[in-house]
Amino acid sequence: MLADRDALLRRLHELRSEHRDLDTVIARLEGTGIDQLQLQRLKKRKLRLKDEIAWAESRLLPDITA
């Protein structure tokens, strides 16, 4: 169980890092005349990363039943 948690924490760190990197890339590319389709793909990838981050974070939180 502890190894699973550690692996999930590492994956969460990787996802957050990639999300930040994409945020930086998108900010630099907007308004530069880049292909809008490519920009749209980057933004979709960023949204998928956000969903994966939320999923990983929810897996790390203990279940609380009231």
Image (cartoon, helix red, strand yellow):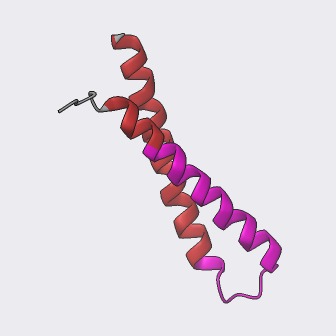
Q: Name the quadrant of the C terminus.
A: top left
Residue 11 is situated, as x and y percent measured from the top left of the image, at 48, 33
Q: Nearer the viewer, residue 23 or 45?
A: 45
Q: Quadrant of residue 43?
A: bottom right
Total marks shown come to: 0
Taking the spot 51% from the left edge, 53% from the top edge, the residue there is: 50
Q: Is 62 situated above or below 36?
A: above
- On the picture, is 35 further left or further right than 27? right
Q: Quadrant of residue 63?
A: top left
Q: Nearer the viewer, residue 64 or 21?
A: 64
Residue range highlighted in magenta: 28-54
Taking the spot 53% from the left edge, 59% from the top edge, the residue there is: 21
Residue 16 is situated, as x and y percent measured from the top left of the image, at 45, 49
- On the picture, is 25 further left or further right than 14? right
Seen from this angle, which residue lies furthest left?
A: 66
Seen from this angle, which residue lies furthest front?
A: 66
- On the picture, is 2 further left or further right than 31? left
Q: Nearer the viewer, residue 58 or 11?
A: 58
Q: Nearer the viewer, residue 41 or 25?
A: 41
